[in-house]
Image (cartoon, grey):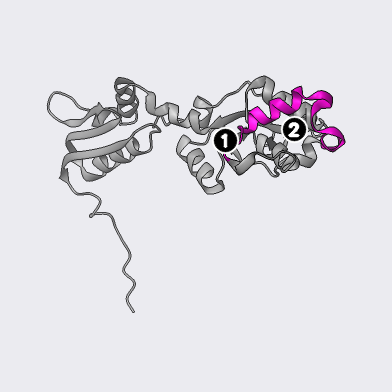
Amino acid sequence: MMRITVNDVMTKQVVAVGPDLPFKEVARVLVRHGVSAVPVVEAGGRVVGVVSEGDLMRKEEGREQYPGDSYRPSLRARLRRRLTMPGGGGGAKAAAGTAAALMTAPAVTVAAHASTVRAARLMDEHGVKRLIVVDEDGRLEGVVSRRDLLGVYLRDDEETRRLVVAGIPAQDRWNDRDGVLVQVHHGIVTLSGYTDRRSQAHAAVRAAESLGGVVDVREDLVWRRDDILELPYSWDRP
């Protein structure tokens, strides 16, 4: 099956910082590049953590008060203000902080070959908005965000149909008389037609369900022989 992987949707040109970068410079990187977090990497490229706007602002929290809490600027706006204040805004406290001291570690990572479904589950399990993509040695390869994963749902219906059809064995695809007919409307895949065996119909449904960006799969397939019930099984008698 031509599944959608993290490698297909991730951002590969990623800004990163070293463990010894001072607080003020980390903040400057976030503001300059318009990102909310950056991976922290050692000299060899191995990811050791992630430092975010939230990590920086927690260190400085409470230094500014907003009357009645009726207004509170965004994290990025507050960072930008600190950078433009005389002396950098953070004073000695900010200067003393480094990326290594501020970061969240270990970083939540994913492999480039993992499916987008797997990436979404990891984000949900860990309550994060992005995953750091690493190779088998833990070296930085990219970043994948929630927005990147949502992008697969913007794929047009014809492309989704092409990918689903490609995942069905050639002998099981629709021809003039039978096979699996694939239709896609607004990301919803409908499988209809006739197959020789139930296992073929089952495989076609699973293939469509495993494709990232598919909203739902509806099945209206008819098979001639239920080979799934014919498979051997063991019966454990008491």
Q: Nearer the viewer, mark 2 or mark 1?
A: 1
Magenta stretch holds residue 208: no
Give the secondary structure at mark 1: strand
Residue 16 appears in the picture as rendered: no
Question: Compared to 109, does 235 lie above or below?
Answer: below
Pinpoint residue 53: horizontal percent, then vertical percent: 67, 34
Which amino acid type is shown beneath numbered disc 1? Arg
* Residue at the far left in the pictured view: 177
Give the secondary structure at mark 2: strand
Residue stretch in magenta: 70-97
Q: Which mark is residue 130?
A: 1
Mark 1 neighbour density, 10 Å: few (under 14) some (14–19) many (20 or more): many
From the viewer's side, name the closer residue of 125 and 176: 125
Pinpoint residue 159: horizontal percent, then vertical percent: 34, 21
* Residue at the far front in the pictured view: 67
Magenta stretch holds residue 73: yes
Determine the image quadrant of residue 174.
top left
Q: Which residue is mark 2?
A: 41
Residue depicted at x 57% and y 35% = 130
From the viewer's side, name the closer residue of 35 and 113: 35
Query: Magenta part mainly helix, strand or loop?
Result: helix
Residue depicted at x 23% and y 55% = 229
Q: CA distance from mark 2 to mark 1?
A: 16 Å
Residue 186 appears in the picture as rendered: yes
Determine the image quadrant of residue 81.
top right
Which amino acid type is shown beneath numbered disc 2? Val
**Along the polypeptide, which appears first: circle 2 or circle 1?**
2
Q: Which mark is residue 66?
A: none
